[in-house]
Image (cartoon, grey):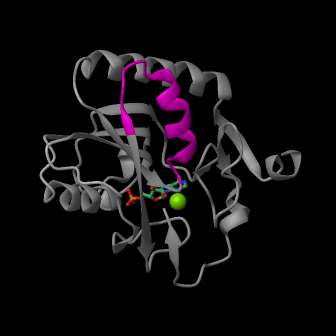
Amino acid sequence: MADLEKDIAKILITRDQLRARIAELGNALSRDYAGQDLLLVCILKGGVLFLSDLIRAIHIPHAIEFMAISSYGGTRIESSGVVRIMMDLNSNIAGRNVLIVEDIVDTGRTLAYIIENLRTRNPASLKICALLDKPSRREVKVNLDYIGFAVPNEFVVGYGLDYNEIYRNLDFIGVLKPEMYAKPAEDSESAT
Ligand code: IMP
Ligand code: MG
């Protein structure tokens, strides 16, 4: 971990802050969905650490599913909104209460695509739980029902979030040193 930490300019959200906020989100979800069906849909790969802690903070019965999305033609620090489903859900969500679990909402393009796609499958309800919200960068309006933390307009990594697939294992959210991504990236297709 020490090796990776040297690339971090500053820690924005500590492990303790993550733990405390996720406990609050788990309580809110347990209350809001009490007595109802609940299916959490985790957006891979970035949402996976958040999902694994969030479900342990939820004390009502629920199921989980995964969906993998990739974004094409953007840079390594910016999504293009041209997204593709790399791995789809394994179950039918018609009539279910679906909660999308996402790592971060930046421009909102990725989430807008996912929402539009899942809506066509007729869930009973469709809500969003995002660990991080970067509102200053929003280009497409998306309604976030549950938000962990708002973050400033800086590129963050850790706790599931990557730069070029690295840093997901950091147990805090940190700002990557800009020199780490100063080199212009080629057009690429990358996992969210
Ligand atoms: P959007 O489509 O611009 O909202 O971007 C959403 C996706 O881009 C997220 O699911 C992340 O995978 C990635 N992303 C956006 N901002 C960051 C960041 O600051 N750090 C790491 N990944 C990010
Ligand atoms: Mg990503």
What residue sits 67% from the left and 59% below the top? 178
Q: How many marks?
A: 0
Boundaries of the magenta span:
46-63
In the image, 36 versus 186, the foreground residue is: 36
Q: Is residue 106 left or right of residue 120?
A: right
In the image, 11 versus 64, the foreground residue is: 64
Give the x, y percent position of residue 35: 23, 18
Give the x, y percent position of residue 48: 54, 47
Q: Is residue 161 magenta?
A: no
- Farthest right residue? 2
In the image, 179 versus 85, the foreground residue is: 85
What residue sits 25% from the left and 57% below the top? 112
Give the x, y percent position of residue 60: 37, 20
Q: Is residue 78 left or right of residue 108?
A: right
What residue sits 40% from the left and 16% below the top? 27
- Asked if residue 135 is positioned above or below residue 176 in the image, the reply reads above
- Asked if residue 110 is positioned above or below residue 71 in the image, the reply reads above
What residue sits 34% from the left and 69% below the top? 81
Q: Quadrant of residue 69?
A: bottom left
Q: Is residue 61 magenta?
A: yes
Give the x, y percent position of residue 58: 43, 22
